[in-house]
Amino acid sequence: MSDTLHVGTYNIHKGFSFFRRRMVIHEVREHLRLLNTDLVFLQEVQGVHHSHARRIHNWPAQPQHEFLADSVWTDFAYGRNAIYDDGHHGNAILSRFPILSWDNQDISGHRFESRGLLHCEIEVPGWPQVLHCICVHLALTAGHRGRQMRQLQNRIEALVPRAAPLIIAGDFNDWTHQAQQGFARGLELREAFESVHGHPARSFPAALPVLQLDRIYVRGFEVRDARVHHGNPWARISDHAALTSVLQRV
């Protein structure tokens, strides 16, 4: 039994490089494996895209979350958020441990920006309670983002026991720090990178990050380490940097 988890979050930009110049999902898989995390929270995951599959010769036959999980992360869940004629995309969680249940809550602010909360209950061997994991990708506008944070808080208060370990990670689009000022304090959450370095990670754009968009919030853990992975090679495979953290259950 281990009380330590290594987790990561990454907006994979639907498997395309910055400005969508080339398909890089194979490189994304390679570099995600090198992070050696137990859990990965992914945003902008392409479940299906028929025209890409016809046009790009090495487009994976599997949905991107299955292709990325491969033999490394034995369990996965995918929440389909945006649906269109050619396919759909959304959030995903990859796990080395059994996912007991999952649910995707629609929190879309309007029909032009589809968003969801992917909530998994995960069984970590030897832990007395299930681990709750929520993957998010929030809206670009402050008004919609604020409503989505309230929906997230309501879900946690209703479904996650106070004593249960909890991780919330993803692309918050929160350059104004509303998350920390609002729902994080109310739910007694700690932001992993801020706990170690005194401020949230700069994660966008990946080549030279300026904006603090991506976060890992935790409850029931001590944060042992937190890193942002930017510059090369990360800047070649997404517009966001990846974040990782080492957490110890308390």
Image (cartoon, rainbow, N blue to C red):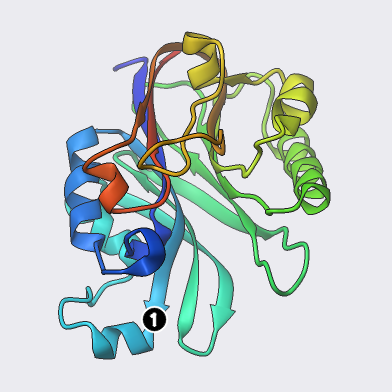
Residue drawn at x 23%, y 40% is 232
249, 89: nearer the viewer? 89
85, 156: nearer the viewer? 85
Position of 212 with respect to 54 (left or right) is right
Position of 124 with respect to 176 (left or right) is left
Q: Is residue 55 in view?
A: yes
Give neighbour class at mark 1: few <14, some 14-19, many 20+ (Cα, 10 Å): some
Q: Quadrant of residue 23?
A: bottom left
| Residue 57 horizontal/vertical position (percent) | 16, 83
Residue drawn at x 41%, y 59% is 13
235, 64: nearer the viewer? 235
Q: Which residue is mark 1?
A: 49
Q: Quadrant of the N terminus?
A: top left
| Residue 206 horizontal/vertical position (percent) | 39, 42
| Residue 198 horizontal/vertical position (percent) | 55, 10
Query: Where is 185 relative to 83, above or below?
Result: above
Residue drawn at x 70%, y 25% is 180
69, 198: nearer the viewer? 198
Q: Quadrant of residue 157?
A: top right
| Residue 100 horizontal/vertical position (percent) | 46, 46
Under mark 1, the amino acid is: His
Query: Where is 31 relative to 23, above or below?
Result: above
Position of 44 with respect to 188 (left or right) is left
